[in-house]
Image (spheres, rainbow, N blue to C red):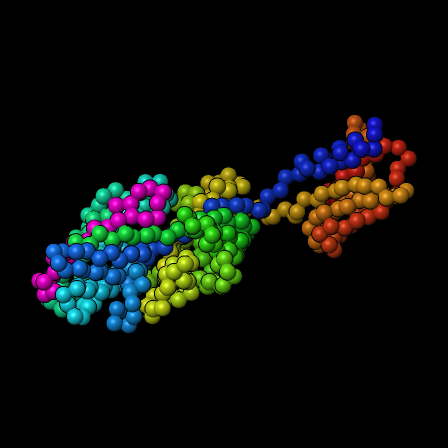
Amino acid sequence: MSRLTVISLAVLALSACQLWGQAEAQIRIHCLSVLFHPVPTNIQTVTYSLELGAVDASLGPPNGELFPNFSDSVGDFTSLRGYYRFTASNRQKPFADDFIVEIPPFVDLNGNGISDFFEIGQGVPTTTTGGLFEDTGIQGGSIQATWTRPANSANGIVQMSMKSSILKLDATFIIPFEILEYAGTFEYTPGNTTTEGSITFVRVSQPNLSLAGTVKFKKDAADLIDLLPGSWADAAGKAIPYQGYLSVSSQTALIQRLGSNYEGLIAFDDGTFSRTGPVFDLNRNIQPIVWDLSIADPNDFDANGIPDLSDSTLPPLRPRRPYLSLSRSSNRLLFSLLGQVGQSYQIEQSLDLVQANWTTVLSVQLTNETQVFLWPPPPANAFWRARIP
């Protein structure tokens, strides 16, 4: 048998070792603020313009954002709020005040816990909702909004009919709106009390915009994990601090499990993104930008029905499996052992694979990930393997 065959068999024997620990899940974030692009409308000889934003229009130009109108139960909201600025070509000054519009009712056709309204892959059929805007009157002005957005598109149309007797307004504005979503992978190492790893995101429909960094979750229960504060970097390397969005009742930022899916809220510090980045040119002194975070984790090492992301009954992590390669240098053999720093390994030798009488010829604790050892050549064909004792 040739020496080349000996080396090949040694490598194949090593590759059969089983290892668990590293896992990969799919992760997405969906912005719960919506971007509206202003479009003027003409009625007879008058041109009307409606602009929406997160900041009181008296403090600066509207940035196009309406943000979630949360109730006391975090995550439970049915409308967007912000401010509007209304101008007309026959009026000398614009009028600006509070603005609230309902979004389409919660629908989740793919069962991932995310409202289809905020998910690019899911469409929004024609749906009519209501709303109110302040006009200095007792009852305020009324809004009727008709929404539609095709599946696999970030862009939709809302037709807003606004009426106000105070402003003498009865006009319909056809406004393009845009939702924001990032998708990527979460590579993690599970533990019994925490799970941590790295994420890489790209913006859906605009892949030149990205986010990357590390993330860590604390395991509170099989169905609950807590997102710990951290920071990601955008494509330009700018740090984007984040934290779980705190529940009003429990003051915790819990991510809930639904089967193999996880869903919860994540908040980014106000003013950290630009409009060409993940969200908007904020410059506003209100709540942070809130996103819905979802994770699909197919990993279940112990097959108990709980994904490894939140499973607190996992077996201990096995050390990294060794990989042994062999080469010749002059009249010596060179063993190259790849493994885990600090772990002890044994190199064993056998003169044939039929009897497979393995004897330890070298014991070593790695101080580097890869270490090289010199060994005299055997008088006849031989086989080697590396193993964890």
Q: At which x and y percent is residue 106? A: 27, 47
Asked if residue 2 lies left or right of residue 29, the reply is right
Point out the image quarter for the C terminus. top right
The magenta span reads 148-171
Please indicate, yes or no, whether residue 349 appears anywhere in the rendered image: yes
Q: Position of residue 16 (x, y in %)?
A: 67, 36
Residue 164: name its quadrant: bottom left
The kind of secondary structure the magenta stretch mainly shows is strand
Could you tell whether 129 is left or right of 324 in the image?
left
Q: Give 150 or 113, whichever is nearer the viewer.
A: 150
Quarter of the view holding residue 165: bottom left
Q: Is residue 167 magenta?
A: yes
* Residue 109 image-quadrant placement: top left
Q: Is residue 222 visible?
A: no
- Image point 52% across, 57% down: which residue? 213
- The residue lying at 54 percent from left, 45 percent from top is 23
Nearer to us in this view, 58 or 1: 58
Lateral position of residue 100 relative to residue 252, left or right: left
**x 49%, y 45%: residue:** 25
Residue at 23 percent across and 43 percent down: it is 126
Describe residue 369's horizontal placement relative to residue 187 as left or right. Answer: right
Outermost residue to the front = 45
| Depicted 277 relative to depicted 6: above or below | below
Residue 296 % position (x, y): 44, 45
Q: Quick check: is 385 in the magenta stretch?
A: no
Quadrant where the N terminus sits is top right
How many callouts does the rendering have? Answer: 0
Up the image or down, 130 lies above or below 385; here it is below
**Looking at the image, which is closer to me, 113 or 285?**
285
The one nearer the camera, 312 or 147, is: 147
* Image position, residue 29 (x, y; %): 41, 52
